[in-house]
Amino acid sequence: MPIPELSVIIPAYQAAGVIGCCVEALQSQTLPRSMYEIIVVDDGSSDGTAEAARAAGADRVLRIPHAGPAAARNAGLQAARGEIVLFTDADCEPSPTWLERMVEPFSDPTVAGVKGTYRTRQRERIARLVQLEYEFRYARMARMARIDFVDAYAAAYRRGVLIRAGGFDPAFPVPSAEDVELSFRLARAGHRLVFAPEAWVWHRHPTRLGHYLRRKARYGFWRALLYLRYPEKIHGDAHTDPALKVQLALLILIGAGLASAWVHPLALGLSGMALLGFLFSTFPFVRWAWGRDREVALLWPWVTLLRVAVQGAALAIGLLYHAGFTPRPIPCASTKLPDPPDGQPPAEG
């Protein structure tokens, strides 16, 4: 079998219900099928994920003990043969041109990594809000010549770059910020990462507010570890809305004013002014979203208030938690990725 030019790696945990659609979408790309291999890494699933991936046409299905998406991606990277490695998630369905659009930027030899985008077919209110939240950030990112933030739902890298960097850091044991940590690390080392807005995958976003907020809490908790390792990113990155820092400060003022109102009545006025400032900070998104989805535009200020409160609290807890423990060292300048958790090569499933 000829060596493929590209390797697509999909970490999958308890994904029997969705992995088939992902693999089948990858079978129908505009690039010749001989150019790429599909590697699914079953991260210790018990629901038949491996069997579903194999039935859908994955070239290789590896099985490792459950250790999280970072370890699963590393196992796939060890097995990959392509010079360019691409990553997506089991609950994504790449568009027919996804591979083609993702690899186009690599014609520039200075490009080390590429980020794609989400789209969704969902019509639920919260799912539409999530999609517009991403698109608002994509619009800002599209104006940048290089970025520092690559999500693994649609990511591509030169394989040699990842191997020398040591791959993904398994200190992030759940889907959270392991992909962002890798892109921060590569950007800090001087590698050029770029955005490919037309390289998109379909995704199933949260459809309930509680689910959305729980995800934001998890990201906030693990983002704390990122900030401890990369304090320069506190000032911002290519993806995070710059208004978030202002909103967090205003939310603290709102809380402080409410807590002090029983001591001094003027504190209640401070809370009111901070709330008005907070709502005003959401206006750029509201104005941008108004012509796209008016219902989402009207919901945005109040959902943002909840999101910043939840994410800010999780960030504070995360800073206390992660600062109290010595983070696992990140492998750097490595010529070999760490072995899977049990010390054995990933098994073919």
Image: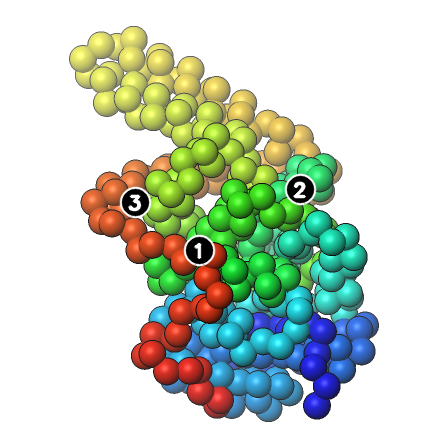
Residue 130 is situated, as x and y percent measured from the top left of the image, at 56, 50
Q: Considering only vertical position in the picture, is 3 above or below 91?
A: below
Of residues 110 and 309, the one drawn nearer to the viewer in this rendering? 110
Categorize mark 1 by other alpha carbons within 10 Å: few (<14), some (14-19), many (20+).
some
The colour style of the image is rainbow
Identify the residue at horizontal 45%, vertical 72% (top origin): 72
Q: Residue 265 occupies which quadrant of the picture? A: top left
Residue 50 is situated, as x and y percent measured from the top left of the image, at 49, 86
Residue 175 is situated, as x and y percent measured from the top left of the image, at 43, 61
Q: Do the residues under discs 1 and 3 have CB atoms within 8 angstroms?
A: no
Q: Which mark is residue 261?
A: none
Q: Considering only vertical position in the picture, is 157 above or below 3?
A: above
Along the horizontal axis of the image, is 281 left or right of 255? Answer: right
- To which residue does mark 3 refer? 318
In this figure, what is the number of numbered marks? 3
Identify the residue at horizontal 35%, vertical 12% (top origin): 269
**CA separation in Å, label 1 and label 3:** 25 Å
**CA separation in Å, label 2 and label 3:** 29 Å
Say what secondary structure mark 2 lies in: loop
Q: Do the residues under discs 1 and 2 have CB atoms within 8 angstroms?
A: no
Along the horizontal axis of the image, is 206 left or right of 71? Answer: right
What amino acid type should be assigned to the residue bearing mark 2?
A: Arg
Residue 335 is situated, as x and y percent measured from the top left of the image, at 48, 65
Q: Going by the picture, which residue comes out furthest to the left?
A: 263
Q: Which mark is residue 332?
A: 1
Identify the residue at horizontal 22%, vertical 10% (top origin): 264
- To which residue does mark 2 refer? 146
Say what secondary structure mark 3 lies in: helix
